[in-house]
Amino acid sequence: MNKTTDEQNERRFAKGIYLLPNLFTTAGLFAGFYAIVAATKGLYDYAAITIFIAMIADGLDGRVARLTNTTSAFGAEYDSLADMVAFGIAPSVTAYSWGLHVFGKLGWLIAFFYAAAGALRLARFNVHVEDDTQDPRFFYGLPIPAAAALVASSMWIMHINAVNGYFSSVLMAIATVYAGGMMVSNIRFYSFKTFDFKGKVPFVALLAIVLIFMGISLDPPTVLFIAFAIFAVSGPVYALWGLRRKRKMKKPKSDTSV
């Protein structure tokens, strides 16, 4: 008699889990939880910073797992749950605590919309992760870490520059709704998965990286906001550009015959 899938998974789990990649996942989960605590206490700088720390941990856990050949189904599920806390719940709570609360019921509904969109984005990603028919060069919908970075950096740059009042809350609402909407859209965003990090690059590329790190060090909120805002609008801009090209190709040529 064959064992069921659940029994097989339980036996695999009983043998243990890989420590190293799950340490980075746990670090991201911890950072996301701390961001929630910091936001509820009014420590918005710390909330934004720890969300970006969670992004770093999230970027490392998968790469470490692949480099050390320690990928597992448990790690993938754990990573998805940690992402929901760090990039779904933490940014929505931070946005609500900082500015959305002034809208009353509408404010927490906007925050919930972002959190729900993040959950849907992660669920869709998990379903299509093994889909070989999708173009690996693109994400379909804004990735949830980038959406979290847009919300966190929007709040951070306004908070650090003392942009307060009703107008700042409106801007926060726009950023939150936009990020949530882009996550559940089918708009394509460049994934950088096909970028060859092992290959040779021009010397000027290394200089550009140095300048980027210098900019982040001098003014982290501004540089991070500009970077993720550009990425967040790149998808719609690329989609509109592609639509315009298709319309030009379908447009019939004028008859110049005599």
Image (spheres, grey):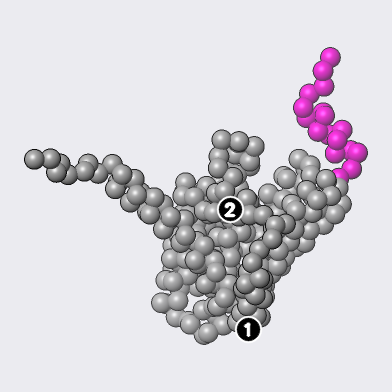
Q: Nearer the viewer, residue 55 or 80?
A: 55
Q: Amino acid at mark 1?
A: Leu
Residue 222: where, in percent of width, then height?
55, 78
Q: Which residue is mark 2?
A: 191
Rounded to the nearest angstrom, the CA distance separating label 2 from label 1 is 27 Å
Q: Residue at x 58, y 72 (%)?
A: 224
Q: Amino acid at mark 2?
A: Ser
Q: Residues within 10 Å of mark 1 (few under 14, many from 20)?
A: few
Secondary structure under the numbered disc 2 in the rendered image: loop
Count of all numbered marks drawn on residues in the image: 2
Residues marked 2 and 1 touching at CB (< 8 Å): no
Horizontal placement of 198 versus 137: left or right?
Answer: right
Residue 221: where, in percent of width, then height?
58, 77
Q: Nearer the viewer, residue 82 or 226?
A: 226
For residue 131, which numbered disc appears in the image?
none
Report if residue 97 is visible in the image. no
Residue 95: where, in percent of width, then height?
54, 68
Residue 216: where, in percent of width, then height?
63, 77
The furthest residue to the right:
15
Query: What range of the chain is rendered magenta?
Result: 1-17
Snapshot quadrant of residue 130: top right
Q: Which residue is mark 1?
A: 218
Q: The N terminus lies in which quarter of the figure? A: top right
Vertical comparison of 1 with 9: above or below: above
Q: Residue at x 70, y 54 (%)?
A: 82
